[in-house]
């Protein structure tokens, strides 16, 4: 009797490759190492009141770290009083406090809403901002855009776009505001002020993804930005290092998503030069 051997599907012999976490690409593209992340975490975990860094800076660092490496950082990496400070500030400014019966939020509200959405998306959903408060925040952004500075101060526009129910602040003269922001971006780029350039560029990328090619980020520009990262690494300024890293992540993003689960950045690789085919409009699924 001849035994029959069951047919083998060659596809069954292919080992499924483990799915890489999204941050892996951007970390390698920017030359960020495991040692760098350890140093960043050490600064975030310094005791409150440290002479090295303030709690505000630690909060900002933790937000930037979670954004680019959510597989390595979380809200537990910051002392409980850091998250408590965010919630307390918003509670007071948004009027859930008898000391402020008629609140008129300032632009710092946008920053802390952004922080909370990254740290604790569930707590963010419970932080109710009413329509009038959003309108007041938009008015403040308009005043900034029409002021002598000539543009929305980065990163206020980015904060608004990623936390509000609408994808960008309603500006009275949007084209003028955009041109002023872009001109300022070009100015600091020509001056080789890389940290400021990256911050402005990230703001523009989030607010106007369809015009990202106008940022003119060539491979030479990316080399300069990587060199700037290396400079802060060598000087041990880990607060500036991780802040610049997070803004570069926005610039390199192929997709930016803001939804009930938080703010997420997806990457392909850093393109040699931005063009219409390499940029996708950020998906802003609102709550």
Image (cartoon, rainbow, N blue to C red):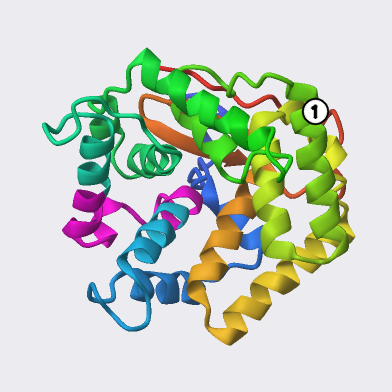
Q: Does 170 sit above or below residue 145? A: above
Circle 1 crowding by C-alpha within 10 Å: few under 14, some 14–19, many from 20:
some
Q: Does 277 sit above or below residue 159? A: above
Residue 2 shows up from this direction: no
Left or right: residue 209 versus residue 179 is left
Left or right: residue 11 versus residue 150 is left
The residue tagged 1 is 176
- For the residue pair 121 and 35, the one nearer the viewer reads as 121
Residue at 53 percent across and 45 percent down: it is 22
Residue 159 shows up from this direction: yes
Q: Does 32 sit above or below residue 92? A: below
**Residue 51 sits in which quadrant?**
bottom left
Residue at 35 percent across and 76 percent down: it is 42
Q: What is the magenta segment's predominant secondary structure?
A: helix
Q: Give the range drawn in magenta.
A: 65-85
**Residue 43 sits in which quadrant?**
bottom left
**Residue 44 sits in which quadrant?**
bottom left
For the C terminus, give its image quadrant: top left
Residue 36 position in % (x across, y down)? 50, 74
For the N terminus, give its image quadrant: top left
Residue 7 position in % (x across, y down)? 52, 24
Task: Specify whether residue 177 is painted magenta.
Answer: no
Residue at 53 percent across and 25 percent down: it is 139
Q: Which residue reaches farthest left?
A: 98
């Amino acid at each position: 009797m001849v035994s029959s051997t069951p047919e083998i599907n060659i596809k069954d012999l292919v080992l499924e490759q483990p799915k890489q976490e999204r941050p892996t690409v951007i970390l390698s593209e920017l030359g960020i190492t495991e040692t760098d992340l350890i140093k960043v975490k050490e600064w975030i975990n310094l005791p409150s009141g440290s002479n090295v860094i303030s709690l505000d800076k630690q909060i900002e660092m933790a937000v930037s770290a979670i954004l680019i490496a959510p597989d390595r950082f979380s809200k537990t990496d910051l002392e409980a009083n850091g998250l408590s400070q965010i919630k307390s500030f918003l509670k007071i400014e948004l009027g859930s406090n008898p000391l402020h019966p008629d609140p008129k939020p300032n632009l710092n509200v946008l920053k802390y809403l952004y922080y909370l959405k990254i740290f604790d998306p569930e707590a963010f959903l419970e932080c109710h901002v009413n329509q009038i408060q959003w309108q007041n925040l938009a008015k403040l952004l308009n005043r900034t855009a029409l002021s002598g500075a000539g543009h929305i101060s980065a990163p206020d526009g980015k904060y608004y776009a990623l936390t509000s129910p609408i994808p960008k602040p309603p500006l009275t003269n949007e084209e003028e505001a955009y041109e002023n922001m872009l001109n300022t971006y070009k100015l600091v780029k020509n001056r080789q002020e890389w940290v400021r350039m990256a911050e402005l560029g990230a703001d523009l990328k989030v607010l106007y993804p369809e015009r990202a090619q106008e940022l003119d980020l060539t491979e030479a520009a990316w080399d300069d930005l990587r060199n700037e990262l290396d400079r802060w690494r060598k000087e041990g300024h880990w607060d500036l290092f991780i802040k610049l890293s997070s803004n570069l992540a926005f610039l390199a993003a192929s997709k930016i998503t803001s939804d009930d689960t938080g703010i997420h950045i997806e990457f392909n690789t850093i393109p040699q030069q931005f063009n219409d085919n390499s940029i996708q409009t950020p998906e802003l699924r609102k709550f």
